[in-house]
Amino acid sequence: MNTLATRFHQLHQQDLLILTNVADATGARLVEHLGGRAVATSSAAVAWAHGYPDGNALPLERLVATVQSIARVISVPLTVDVEAGYSDDLGRVAEVLDAVIAAGAVGINIEDGSADPELLARKIERARQVAKKRDVKLFINARTDVYLKGLVPADERVTETLRRAALYQSAGADGLFAAGVTAAYEIDAICQGTTLPVNVLGFASLPPPETLQVLGVRRLSAGSGIAEFLYGAMGGLVNSFLATGKLDTHDLKAFTYGEVNDLLK
């Protein structure tokens, strides 16, 4: 397992690592087959696949079963999005992380959301302790939602992101996920302001991968975007089939994150 963990760490020190987020084992195997150097889960996509909304609602046993099924069919590193650890209780967070690592994850995403960043720092410390007991060189990717949730005024976003990056790095984080940043000058400032490998989310307004690499980005994630498109395509096919009895693949479009998530609330 540590061979995969070491490889995953190394992938963040080379060129841009492009991670295609999946919901299940077949999707993970497809990513590896098509050349993915690692596989990532999307917390939203995994929750949706099990009939739950995104947002700390997925039962642990469903998450663990998904991780086990993915790890069984791939030979590349697997990183798992654990949302905010599915709890604010540090003991419970430790249980979740221990189960995810035991199931085959060598990396995690864990996020701050709208909570006090000190709470995520404590969760990161607990994750490091759990990984040490498991003797796994876990890659802890700390996601900050400064941009995604608009936590501070626009002119303070870079400064606040870097403040949190320093806090999370001190707690034991290996990477910084600045989810939602898209402007090249802000990406550059974030990459220059931290020694952590920087991860960005693949929004349409993001600079191309070649530019991201020049700016210093080391990881690009699809997030829930692929799942949103797939559910949108399914909706188009179902609607057409119900109306005509034929599978019409024209004019398919993605659902938005909100449309999929709202279906399950």
Image (tube, grey):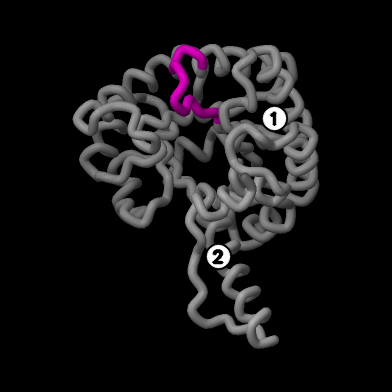
Q: Is residue 64 magenta?
A: no
Secondary structure under the numbered disc 2 in the rendered image:
helix
Which residue is more in the foreground, 247 or 103? 247
- Is residue 68 at all visible to an observer of this figure? yes
Which residue is more in the foreground, 67 or 152? 152
Quadrant position of the N terminus in the picture: top right
Mark 1 or mark 2, which has the lower sequence index?
A: 1
- Residue 162 is left or right of residue 8, and the answer is left
Mark 2, other Cα within 10 Å: few <14 / some 14–19 / many ≥20: some
> Where does the magenta region start and end?
110-119
Q: Quadrant of residue 133?
A: top right
Quadrant position of the C terminus in the picture: top right
- The structure residue drawn at horizontal position 47% and vertical position 31%, both measured from the top left corner, is 143
Mark 1, other Cα within 10 Å: few <14 / some 14–19 / many ≥20: few
Which residue is more in the foreground, 194 or 60? 60
Q: Whole-percent x and y of residue 6?
A: 61, 32
Residue marked by disc 1: 2
Q: How many marks?
A: 2
Residue marked by disc 2: 232
Q: Whole-percent x and y of residue 181?
A: 33, 40
Three-letter code, disc 1:
Asn
Closer to the observer: label 1 or label 2?
Answer: 2
Q: Is residue 114 magenta?
A: yes
- The structure residue drawn at horizontal position 65% and vertical position 41%, both measured from the top left corner, is 78
- The structure residue drawn at horizontal position 50% and vertical position 54%, both measured from the top left corner, is 225
**In the rendered image of this protein, does residue 120 appear above or below residue 38?**
above
- Is residue 175 at all visible to an observer of this figure? no
- Residue 245 is left or right of residue 220, and the answer is right
Secondary structure under the numbered disc 1 in the rendered image:
helix
**In the rendered image of this protein, does residue 158 appear above or below residue 226?**
above
Q: Quadrant of residue 216?
A: top left
